[in-house]
Amino acid sequence: MKSIRKELWFNIPSRCGFVNITPEVESALRESGIREGLCLVNAMHITASVFINDDESGLHHDYEEWLEGLAPHDPAGKYWHNRAGEDNADAHLKRQVMGREVVVAVSEGHLDFGPWEQIFYGEFDGRRRKRVLVKIIGE
């Protein structure tokens, strides 16, 4: 069995944002030469997420508003986590809802997606450099 490990780095200039990382993951898959296996993609930071959904700007806007309604950033003082000097408790909660990772089957050298599926990096406490791990295993 073969495997490849690759890190993708992001620095989202705003507090919250979504990036379609499907092309970077597909590039790693091509580089690996793996034709059949599994591809794990996970955020390596506790205030960021990796998830699969449709690449549609209205949906991304809806995610931002929905997540802000679930865990609003302000007032930051309402969160116990922030009492230690942080201001990102909401980002931890948003990450919990959106998830840490995705696993996609690799079939015939391609990510085996359903219709419209794409892989996204979700940032909830941006303005600094963060990474995503891509680990592909198979034959």
Image (cartoon, rainbow, N blue to C red):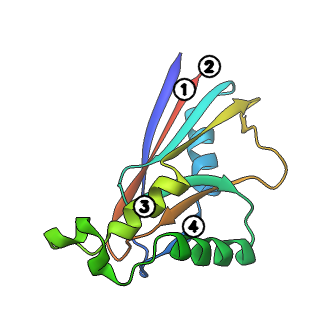
The residue where tag 2 is placed is 139
Foreground mark, 3 or 4, reads 3
- The spot of residue 27 in percent (x, y) is 60, 48
The residue where tag 3 is placed is 93
**Tags 3 and 1 touching, CB below 8 Å:** no
- The spot of residue 56 in percent (x, y) is 75, 71
**Tags 3 and 2 touching, CB below 8 Å:** no
**Tags 4 and 1 touching, CB below 8 Å:** no
Question: Mark 3 falls on what kind of element?
Answer: helix
Of the residues under marks 4 and 1, which one precedes in the sequence?
A: 4
- The spot of residue 7 in percent (x, y) is 41, 49
- As measured in the structure, the alpha-carbon distance from the residue carrying label 4 to the one carrying label 1 is 24 Å
Q: Amino acid at mark 4?
A: Val
Foreground mark, 3 or 1, reads 3
Residue shown at 76% from the left, 43% from the top: 113
Foreground mark, 3 or 2, reads 3
- As measured in the structure, the alpha-carbon distance from the residue carrying label 3 to the one carrying label 4 is 19 Å
Question: Mark 2 falls on what kind of element?
Answer: loop
Quadrant containing the C terminus is: top right
- As measured in the structure, the alpha-carbon distance from the residue carrying label 4 to the one carrying label 2 is 29 Å
Foreground mark, 2 or 1, reads 1
Q: Residues within 10 Å of mark 2 (few under 14, many from 20)?
A: some
* Marking on residue 19: 4
